[in-house]
Amino acid sequence: MRRREFITLLAGAAVLPLPANAQHVGRRVPRVGVLLYGTAETDPNYGAFRHGLRELGYVENQNIALEPRSADGMPERLPVLARELIAAKPDLIYVLGGDVAPFVRAATSTIPIVMAVSNDPVQSNLVASLARPGGNITGVTFVASDLAAKRLQFLHELAPQLARVAVLWNPDHVDPEYRETQAAGKTLGIQVHSLEARSRADFERAYQTALSVGAEALIPISSRLMTVNRAGLLAFAARPRLLLASGWGPWAREGALLSYGPDLDEITRRSAAHVDKILRGASPADIPVEQPTRFQLVLNANSAKALALAIPERRRALADEVIE
């Protein structure tokens, strides 16, 4: 081969894109510790996060290593698992759930943390502000103003005679939705009863309270605790024929009367971008916490029929999804 041809061949090869794994040959693969309330197999949003990483060019065990720890739905395990993650010294920690993030935040002020939570990160003292987190944690929150009020309003449209609603919430999961539901209830003339549950063991007592106050509807405030126990909550609501409304679409698809809130998969995928920025050198203190900007109303027509309710045509037309 002539010298000129050989140089030309080398120049052309230099501009060819390298596969994702080849770009990291000879470089240490970044390690991302993951803390989950449930398990890697059952958490409904963990797959969306991993999908988000793949969209950004990450291939597990090639140019990124995910190291999950699972609490199996037992919140008492979270502090120990958080300390285990810190001791392993990963490059970054990813947490799913407002029930989970505070334990990791309390365990380290140096290792970067990316969160995807359904509580208020400012009220929970996770960040100084959404625009300027200011510490070692950033990510996404599913919370936005007026969600809870609109959810109760939609419920009232489907059941205009509704008078008593029970709200199931975790006081350790700090967010504004219970207060907002209370305020909306006063406007609509609906009594709002508080059902507190910090763990699965509190559910039976909460159920009995709902029945004793004559609740006609149940609204679980979104958290990992509620998500892990979704099947049981749906089954409870079905027995006394309670109207059930939630903030997340999967609830309505599995039998709740309605849900109104963000597309969980979409915003969880977006949290992967925060991981990418930090692994590329950005500081979590400078990456704003992202809030949802689009919301979905999902109505379950089958559940409405079983409850002898009619979905107004105007509301049906405006819904993002109607389960028939």
Image (cartoon, rainbow, N blue to C red):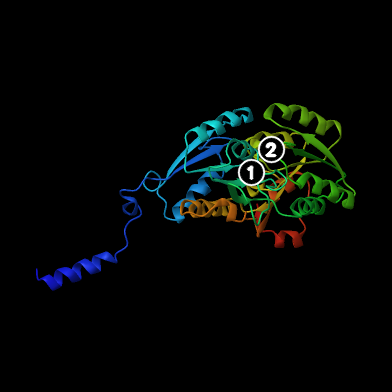
Amino acid type, callout 1: Glu
At 59% from the left and 28% from the top, the residue drawn is 77
At 69% from the left and 36% from the top, the residue drawn is 233
Asked whether, in this view, residue 215 is left or right of residue 59, the answer is right
Residue 4: x percent and y percent? 14, 73
Residue 134: x percent and y percent? 63, 51
Sequence-wise, the earlier of marks 2 and 1 is 2
Task: Identify the element where label 1 is drawn.
Answer: loop
Disc number at residue 254? 1
Question: Do the residues under discs 2 and 1 have CB atoms within 8 angstroms?
Answer: yes
The residue indicated by pointer 2 is 234
Asked whether, in this view, residue 48 is left or right of residue 317, the answer is left
Amino acid type, callout 2: Leu
Q: Residues within 10 Å of mark 1 (few under 14, many from 20)?
A: some
Residue 73: tell me if it is visible: no
Q: Residues within 10 Å of mark 2 (few under 14, many from 20)?
A: some
69, 225: nearer the viewer: 69
313, 197: nearer the viewer: 197
Could you tell me how far apart the alpha carbons at marks 2 and 1 are, in whole angstroms?
8 Å
Residue 85: x percent and y percent? 51, 34
Which corner quadrant of the image does residue 230 belong to? top right
